[in-house]
Image (cartoon, rainbow, N blue to C red):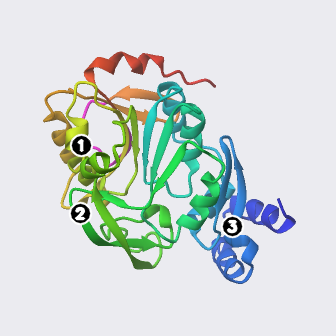
Amino acid sequence: MSLLIRFLKIYYKTRWRGSFRLTDILAKRVESLQCVPIETDSGIVYGDLRISSSRGILAQPKSTSGEDIVMRNLVKSGDTVYDIGAHFGFYTLLLSKLVGENGKVYAFEPNPELLPSLKRTISSSKNIELIPVALSEENGSVKLFVPEDASMASLGDWTNGIAGNVHQVECEMRRLDDLTEEKKMPVPNFIKCDVEGAELSVFAGGIKMLDRVDAPILLFEINSGAAHAFDKTSESYFEFLRKLDKPQYIFFEVLPDRIEELKSSNVNYANILALPQIKQNLHREIVYKN
């Protein structure tokens, strides 16, 4: 890691006012800052420091949400996994290691501004296939709303200035059920879905895949503010999944140090683990170590 990048990593951790703005100015002028190798527990993630979310990874290259613990406990060697909203590949690399050489990770990322870094991140992983489309309940061309913090990019314009100025990019939108039938992708064992409010649209476009007794385990984000951009509430997610007759999903909230069975559908922000009934006892296998 170069001295400049080491300095910037320390600088971000101070959270001094203007630190990200200074980097934005530097990254636009220094080409090496547009493809920065960041060492994480799962491997090297390449970040573009013109994009603010990569600065966050540089400052904090470890997961603090508890999602990685869930993945490490529930994703097995040989599994097929969908990483929907792969971003720079932070969790894609972890999932790749967990499924091993006999497994497969399908990484979905529609933002063309992230693809150069993501492709570099996954270039040495033979078990990852990149699919550069947005998933929804319709097929077609669509605008992706991308704020300065690209981790909050969405098919809905929801950020209201909290993530910086928003611009739009064109991307392809596909239904998951159609993609799996056309590409003959196997039904996954595990789905991680973080698409800033569009999660329910993803599920609706993959209803055939989900309405099965052997349905995939779901790990997804609920952000009620983002959901409102799609005229949905947090309750809408649970209503949809509970109406699926075959999987009979049971829900848990993922916290940094534990998981808890969900007691209310009125959620403002949370990471949710949904287990089909035949796999409901798997939550006992999730062990958090201090």
User: Which amino acid type corresponds to the residue marked 3 in the rendered image?
Assistant: Cys
Task: Provide the secondary structure element on which disc 2 rests.
Answer: loop
Q: CA distance from mark 3 to mark 2?
A: 32 Å
Residue 124 lies in the magenta stretch: no
Q: From the image, state whether disc 1 or disc 2 is nearer to you.
A: 2
Estimate how packed mark 3 is, as few (under 14), some (14 to 19) or many (20 or more) residues with alpha carbons within 10 Å: many
The residue sitting at 48% across, 22% down in the picture is 286
The residue nearer to you, when weighing 105 against 226, is: 105
* Residue at numbered disc 2: 139
Name the outermost residue toward the right: 3
Q: CA distance from mark 1 to mark 3?
A: 40 Å
Extent of the magenta region: 262-273
Image quadrant containing the N terminus: bottom right
Image quadrant containing the C terminus: top right
Q: Is residue 287 left or right of residue 254?
A: right
Task: Provide the secondary structure element on which disc 3 rests.
Answer: loop
Rendered image: mark on residue 266: 1
The residue sitting at 53% across, 26% down in the picture is 77
Residue 288 lies in what quarter of the image? top right
Task: Provide the secondary structure element on which disc 1 rests.
Answer: loop
* Residue at numbered disc 3: 35
